[in-house]
Amino acid sequence: MTMTIASLAKKGYKGCSVRRLLNEPELRKQINEDPAVRGNVHSKGIVMDKIAVSGKVLLIGPTGEAKTLFARTILKHLTNAINERKYHIAGCPFNEDAGYLIHIAENYAKDPAASAEVLKNLCPFCKQNIAESIKKVTNQDINLDRSNDILALETEQVIKALNAVKADKTVVNVAQIDPRNDPEGLYMLLAGVENLEQLFGGKTSTTFSPMAHKVGVLSQGFVVVNEIQRLPLNFLEALMGFLEDPSGIKYSIQGRPVFVDGAMIFTSNAPLSVFGEEAQPIINRIPEVLWPARTKLERIKIVEDMFKEHLTLCLNDMTANPALVSLLE
């Protein structure tokens, strides 16, 4: 349902981010206690901390220790929470939080210069929407990249225009790239960025299609990349733009940086030394976490649960659907 910034503010919405979610004790507890991946509680906590800081992490550990399963588990909890709580600026392919505009509208009168700087750092699509809203109120064409254009307007008019900007309910999905069975997966996702480039190069008012070349999935930033050591150097170089900033996930639309509030998790069963000297500058940009083998007791519990699930499936003559298994148990 489309809302406006003003109506969201009345509801008390302040924003929703991966960093904020991963600092909530309740969500961290849900992730730690998820029966899909038992054990390694200490490592789970470190993974959540790394993602909260930089939006990306590399899990290194032995084969068969549920690295990929944990990556999908943590992203499942994150995306469920975001789909439940978050609203973004309407038409934004990067799901820029509507909370930005709520805070700017509330504080613009106190500090217009700082507010104009925040507006200047939004994605090109958001800036176009905001500029159109300002034009409806003031009948003036302005460029949000020039702070003086905004500061020359009356404060009340800017606040009125910001409150009139539309917001959409956020819905995100998780993409998974596995070079073992989907070697072209990354290129398909990168084609989405090229689609964005073409869209921005044409008319920025063109309606954004999240279905075009999976661009919606990539620009949301929730991605699992399996066995990163198997990726050729040119694949890693293609990922470079997303990883180059140490504090977040960074995309570039025609040279303009856009930061995405997401989580990219990479896995590897090999030490960093196998990547070679050419790949080291790229790999070193991803914070790494050692994912150790689980204990004997944890393994016994896993086997018991697998046996119970097998019985449930056999007794009900049905395909293995995790949600149905959970319901019947």
Image: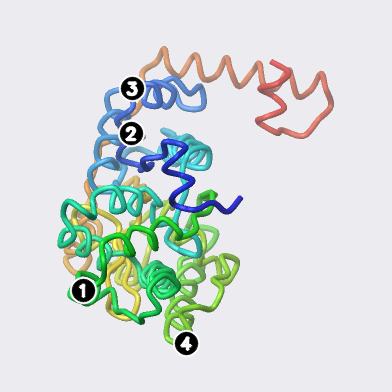
Disc 4 from disc 1: Cα separation = 29 Å
Please give the label number shown on residue 152.
1
For marks 2 and 4, the one nearer the N-term is: 2
Disc 1 from disc 2: Cα separation = 40 Å
For marks 1 and 2, the one nearer the N-term is: 2
| Pointer 2 with pointer 3, Cβ within 8 A | no
Horizontally, residue 193 falls left or right of residue 208, namely left
Horizontally, residue 174 falls left or right of residue 50, namely right
Disc 2 from disc 3: Cα separation = 8 Å
Across and down, in percent, residue 286 comes to 24, 52
Q: Residue at x 35, y 43 (%)?
A: 17
Q: Amino acid at mark 2?
A: Leu
**In the picture shown, does residue 125 fall above or below 111?**
below
* Quadrant of image for the C terminus: top right
Q: Amino acid at mark 3?
A: Pro
Structural crowding at the residue carrying mark 4, measured as other residues with C-alpha within 10 Å and reported as few (<14), some (14–19) or many (≥20): few
Horizontally, residue 12 falls left or right of residue 248, namely right
Please give the label number shown on residue 202.
4
Q: Amino acid at mark 1?
A: Ala
Residue corresponding to mark 3: 25
Across and down, in percent, residue 281 comes to 17, 64
**Comparing labels 1 and 2, the label whose residue is closer to the camera:** 1
Q: SS at mark 1?
A: loop
For marks 4 and 1, the one nearer the N-term is: 1
**In the picture shown, does residue 26 fall above or below 83?**
above
Q: Is residue 173 visible?
A: no
For marks 3 and 4, the one nearer the N-term is: 3
Q: How many marks?
A: 4
Residue corresponding to mark 2: 22
